[in-house]
Amino acid sequence: MKHERRPTLREVARRAGVGVMTVSRVINNHASVQPSTRKKVEAAILHLGYQQNEAARLLKGQRAKIIGLIVPDLSDLFFASCAQTVQHIARSHGYMTLIASSDRDANLERAEAELMASRMISGLLIATSENGENEWLRKLQGPGLSIVGFDRPLLGTDASSVLAENRIGAEQAIQHLMDHGHKRIACVGYDEAVHPVSERIAGYTHHMYAAGLQPQVASGLADLDAIRHWLAGVLASANPPTAIFSLNNRTSTFLLQALAEQLVRVPEEIALVGFDDFDLASLMQPPLTTVAQSPVDLARQSINLLLELIRTQKNPDAGSSALKIFLPSRLIVRSSCGAHKTG
Amino acid sequence: MKHERRPTLREVARRAGVGVMTVSRVINNHASVQPSTRKKVEAAILHLGYQQNEAARLLKGQRAKIIGLIVPDLSDLFFASCAQTVQHIARSHGYMTLIASSDRDANLERAEAELMASRMISGLLIATSENGENEWLRKLQGPGLSIVGFDRPLLGTDASSVLAENRIGAEQAIQHLMDHGHKRIACVGYDEAVHPVSERIAGYTHHMYAAGLQPQVASGLADLDAIRHWLAGVLASANPPTAIFSLNNRTSTFLLQALAEQLVRVPEEIALVGFDDFDLASLMQPPLTTVAQSPVDLARQSINLLLELIRTQKNPDAGSSALKIFLPSRLIVRSSCGAHKTG
DNA sequence: TTGAAAGCGCTAACAG
DNA sequence: CTGTTAGCGCTTTCAA
């Protein structure tokens, strides 16, 4: 089989009996082209199966019809769902998606972002792992490259971001527990440096204080053993908590496991509410009450915003400040909180 | 802030006091360049922070340092883990990764693949959703574009693929159940048209026959209600199965749920082994015995093979046939199969 | 071993 | 409204 070169603009032009610029104009929906001419050109394009050569466009300084997506960890189901949605919507707008995991490393994230930028992507969607100010990002935000943050704000830049209502979500959870009479509510988890988690902790803490209760947060507990150890400790204390607010879905399942091991009945002896819903939450024993946030909604809003920025070429150079869009979180009441009685 | 153009080959050449071609040669490690010249050029490159302009290279017919990855569903944890690994290894070799979900649609898959190919990617990694012959893929396999399949073979092409031992995995599971005295073993699941699942069914069926037992497969059961209905049916039958082999991890969890609802004790009354391990399998009640296959290994082997093909530019045009690499699966014995006693 | 020239396919700028 | 020209930054070809 012979290697067929793809037809070029020139060939289309010749076949349509016009100049190359006319064809270029037709393709880019530029200015006015006589309808009759346009017809001829379109016929030729169709006949030859012409497709733009992006490399040539790039060389002329145009942007690639590609958006970049950077997440902390692609094998995290939350971000995987985001990626699925982003890619889906991007495609429907004619964009392909370049993906990268930052492995929770701000330096790697920066390197990936710069690599993407050097490839002339049109937009960058980023769930940053940079917990501090993001100075380098500002420099990438050149003309033509739109940037949107999601799940975590882009501190120190004027890029907009789409975030979940982590504070309010935590308050909902705590309030629910309070409504059921709990006063000693512990807060457990890890990754407290990342924005969503720190917001949850803040929501918890403030809400406890507001109710005149003493917050009690145990952070840095990332694995089952750490949870076991912490649990044994509080169970042996004078006034063990009657309820636990778990900051991550991993800790939620570990807590369930550890509580079962220590023969603590949930929710009778200790109630549990976890942040972040997950597939199997309803199949746990007992079914887990969670604060849910939808990765699909988050991703949809983010990519739509990004596409909108690309379309309008709104360069926030003019000192416009970072817009923050918050998405609601929702308390899904199952059994582990004690609101429904199990068996 | 002024928009700084990136330095070009010409500028490097001028600074080094040589011609552009010399610089190009240095960059591409071409033929012989006088060491002293090379030194000067390298210094200039470093000083100016020169980076290649890929668009220009593409225009000259070179391949982009990009690999494409197509999976059926990015929000499936198995494929998400693959994506994470692929991207990780690709990056370490200087490649970025373009990703797409085919949404289990062979036509969409084809469109994505062609789009990627038209972007001059160097390699394509694909877990195909085309259950039949893959004629169009053959045409993409031009010179310069290497293709590797993973998880599912690329039928009708001479592209190699990396697969899991689905048949043997199923046999392991069935044999384990037989070793514990089970004779009436049902096989339940869905997606029986996709290669890995059909292989599991084949493994199950053959192994049952080989042991002189009657296979009993119920397929197309994709949700909890379907599972419930099926279970109620078999429980009411004259000779209900004493063990179930679940083809998908979704069905495994649904079965656990349905069995609990019908007050069937696992593993005492019915034993259960599921295909595909997952994060929470060990935290289920009872902990699930599963046949595990590692997405990380699968992805690693696949991307490494692909990178090797790219490196050697092995064009299988010469009629070399599709190589198939099989990765072992592993039976993880927990409690649901009855080998360990719970409580 | 090195350099000069040609041109990949496209679009911006200018002519007509 | 339409066509011509001039490169974008690189690599291939050919000459020195």
Image (cartoon, coloured by chain):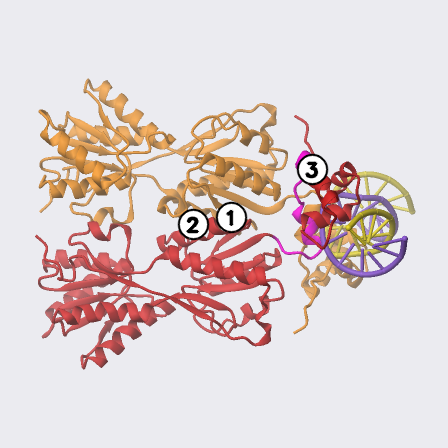
Chain colours: A orange, B red, C yellow, D purple
Q: Residue at x 70, y 48 (%)?
A: B26
Instruction: Residue B8: give x, y in percent of width and height.
Output: 72, 41
Specify the quadrant of the image occupied by residue B50.
top right
Task: Please name the residue that numbered disc 1 is placed on.
Answer: B91
The answer to whether residue A343 is magenta is no
List x then y, in percent, for residue A292: 30, 39
Q: Is residue B233 left or right of residue B83?
A: left
Q: Which residue is mark 2?
A: B84
Q: Which residue is mark 3?
A: B43
Q: Give the residues drawn in magenta, as a range.
A: B44-64
Upstream in sequence: badge 3 or badge 2? 3
Q: Nearer the viewer, residue B170 or A248?
A: B170
What is the CA distance from the residue labelled 3 to the residue labelled 2?
36 Å
Question: Cα distance, mark 1 to mark 2?
Answer: 11 Å
Front-most of B20 and B139? B20
Any mark on residue B310, and which? none
Report helix, strand or loop for mark 2: helix
Does residue B330 appear in this view? yes
Is B52 inside the magenta-drawn segment?
yes
What is the three-letter code of the residue carrying label 3? Answer: Ala
Q: Nearer the viewer, mark 3 or mark 2?
A: 3
From the image, which quarter does the N terminus of chain B lie in?
Answer: top right
Which three-letter amino acid code belongs to the residue tagged 1? Arg
